[in-house]
Image: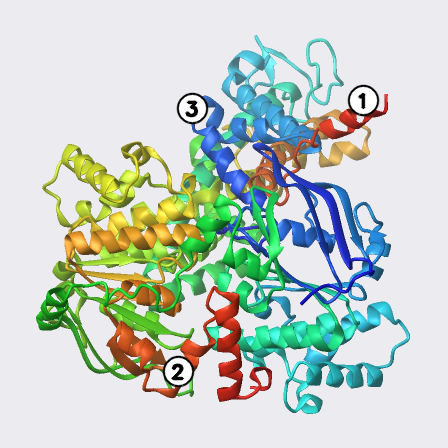
Amino acid sequence: MTLSNPEPVGEGDPGATALSAEAGAVAARRGTPWYLRLPIISHLRSSVGLQRGMLLTGTVLVGILLLTALFAPVLAPYGFAETGVDGTRFGTQQPPSAAHPLGTTVTGFDVLSRVIWGTRTAVAVMACAVAASLFLGVALGLLSGYVGGWLDRLLVMVADAVYAFPSLLLAIVMSIVISGGQSNAWGGIAAAAISITVVFIPQYFRVIRAEVVRLKAEPFVEAAKVVGTGHHRIMGTHLLRNATRTLPLIFTLNASESILTLAALGFLGFGIEPTSASEWGYDLNRAMADATSGIWWTGMFPGIAIALAVLGVTLVGESINDLNDPRLRTRRRRRTPRRTAQKQVRA
Amino acid sequence: MTATQNQAPRLAIQGLDVSFATDAGDVHAVDGVSLEVAPGEILAIVGESGSGKSVTARAVLGLLPETAESSGAVIVSGTDLVGLSAARMRALRGEDVSMIFQEPSSALNPVFPIWWQLGEGLRAHRPKITKKEIRAEAVRALESVGIPDAAERIDRYPHEFSGGQKQRIMIAMALALGAELIVADEPTTALDVTVQAEILGLLREIRESHGTSIIVITHNMGVVADLADSVAVMYHGRIIERAGVRELFASPREEYTQKLLAAVPHLGRNSAWTALEPAQQQAIDAAEPVVVAKDLVIEYPGRMGKPAFRAVKGVDFQIRAGEVYGLVGESGSGKTTIGRAIAGLERTTGGSLSVLGHEMNGMREKAFKPLRRRIGFVFQDPATSFNPHLTIEQCIAEPLIVHEQQLGPVERGKRVRSLLEAVELPGTYAERYPHELSGGQRQRISLARALVLEPELLIADEPTSALDVSVQATVLDLFRELQTRLGFAALFISHDLAVVDSLAHRIGVLFRGDLVEDGHGPDVLQRPTHEYTRKLIASLPVPDPIEQEKRRVAFAAEWGRSTRA
């Protein structure tokens, strides 16, 4: 992860001209309407070529994921736990047909409905996990970095210990502790979210702490101290707002990781009961035996759903990372009016 | 010196054009520059930051970033460099052209010994060279730049050398392959004045012994006067004036050059103390002191098992009400530490430091907080001393929010605008963000922030060292004007004697934590008592080639050959 600092524009720096122009670009952006300055939209506007393609693909995939989750009741032909309509059973392991475009599972669920309802679980867990770890991680990191001393050492040690654990193992232990084995829809989602949260807190904690430790020595923080500004104000106004620039990036990368962790938990059987909510990892687990007997549809579609969701979120995160860093961002090729001028001279 | 006739120029730049592709469109950094450098000539390129002088020099070595596009011709010893293949370019670098960078500590690789680094270039150009030969070459190279015990010291690592020695090593590297043209990008900016004099002497000596052509990029007109044969003045990507150094300083042609030269502070020309009326002088001498330091000691705790580092070793001085006290010294002399201690950013370890009647030794933040409103602080780097997320208005209003909570937002806005007016900036700037202003404007805002509570004491830590000469002059004028009007006492910290003299009523010279000289400006400058002060004054190059040459001869007579120090 690159934590790029605002570099002073200096003469000796070869990128100095580029950097000062950067400042000009920021200034120019202030005049544009607010909706064009939103994170992903402003990134789209400043991107070109392959990077733009990546970001666009990611945004479209994430958009589809979110819309599907929102309109799941409308889109899905059946409920996620339905095995039949009006007393007639769907039948188990039916190949794709007009009634069941993606077939049915070994328990007799409609695969298409399961995949569509699964987006809801994925999005809910993603949102809960990332939000919870974000707030806790940022608060702890800010405090630890600013206060320093023994508190800092203690928190860093704990975070390192959590970090050193295999994250999936930790998530399994947490989900057992939290849900105690049984789970309804929201209980299961909360359990999965909290177990993922525990794994992610150290990441936010470390990033924010490192930024705060660096910023603490910056002249503008010292300027506030010289004036006599209180600790709360220094932390809230001066440190927090400057330390959070890298968060959108970790945010998106963690979101994709949380989908994977949720799927892994479900696959291992620590996830959500199939009757409380649809969950792709669980469906994959049940489809394991089918794969060898030529029943491909039960496993493939949940698998594709996981892959596309992770791909979409990761693409958005990675492109934002590249675009935020002026050294990684590709720019439009310069138009060369001089060459045409020379041609004219020759002609 | 005059260029030898009937000889091809060592470097010829013809119609060089460099543009950078950026988010805000193209930036035209160099716009049709043409110049020639004769063998053995030292050319100084001067100009403000952003004038394209560094980009021009880097184009000579093909060291432009990927986003740059260049056209025109750069001919070094008969080869055109623009559009040359990477392999040909590498062969040329080192043997024909070489470069010396601004910051010697970051230009050397910290994990390799010196001989290895010198050998890098040799290996690249002579693949069959043996280790023994490299070491022999390295010893010869270090000896040629005046590093004593070269045979033993080639095995040392960069951190074991001082800044000046590292710059000598960089010069040795540039010379090792026999480069005929050296590009030096601000070679002495990161060095102290006394070390600068040595490096300048070394460059001059190299030119004489090797016949090397040197391009010096600098903003310091004193360096130009001391070293250069001819000068090119750059402005907005163009060379606007090219002349011999004596002609340029004696009769600058362009208006911009005249302004640039007028802005350079000249040691001893306009002392702040002599500018005062005798009555004012007496008033200041009789005023009550606001800061009294007695035997002040400040230590930084050492790492495990190591003794503490003593940054300030028993210093006595006083700053009286309404007086500007200038503190001069090299880097590491403890001048910034003293300033920070007065502002309560650093703890004192011994002696006594009384600020506005409050004892700082063993101070508690709670007890000191009410005093903070009576002290203002201006930081060195205007780029980093503002929170980038706050508008200018919020930045200036910060002290008001902390200390005068009863003020409403409307009144705060009024105060901010009146201050903006005082520092000669339009009121509309209140809505802007710090990065939208230039360095000089930001330093004005910094002054405004320091003055918003009408302090009795202002501490300015190298407030102009990050600014261009012409901008520095206007900020100093503003400082002088505000000080006369508001009458606050000030501690002005700087490494530049000429700047301090033009501003401070009294000057203190710090040398490795000791105050070696303390007195009124003219006394310190004309009748220095301490050896170090005399050396400091003598090594400061004055922006006048004829006077500087006399000073150089006097310096050599007193301190021996400067390069073998």
Give the position of the N terminus of chain B as an image quadrant.
bottom right
- Which residue bears the numbered disc 2? B534
The residue type indicated by label 3 comes to Trp
| Left or right placement of residue B449 versus residue A177 in this view | left
Task: Examine the image and state in which quarter residue A191 appears.
Answer: top left
Tell me what residue is drawn at x 68 percent, y 9 percent: A99
Q: Position of residue B233 (x, y in %)?
A: 57, 51
Report helix, strand or loop for mark 3. helix
Q: Position of residue B245 (x, y in %)?
A: 58, 61
A55 or B228: which is nearer to us? Answer: B228
- Chain of the residue on which disc 2 is drawn: B
- Which residue bears the numbered disc 3? A34
Tell me what residue is drawn at x 91 percent, y 75 percent: B128
Q: CA distance from mark 2 to mark 3?
A: 61 Å
Q: Position of residue A21 (x, y in %)?
A: 54, 39
Tell me what residue is drawn at x 25 percent, y 81 percent: B349
Q: CA distance from mark 2 to mark 1?
A: 65 Å
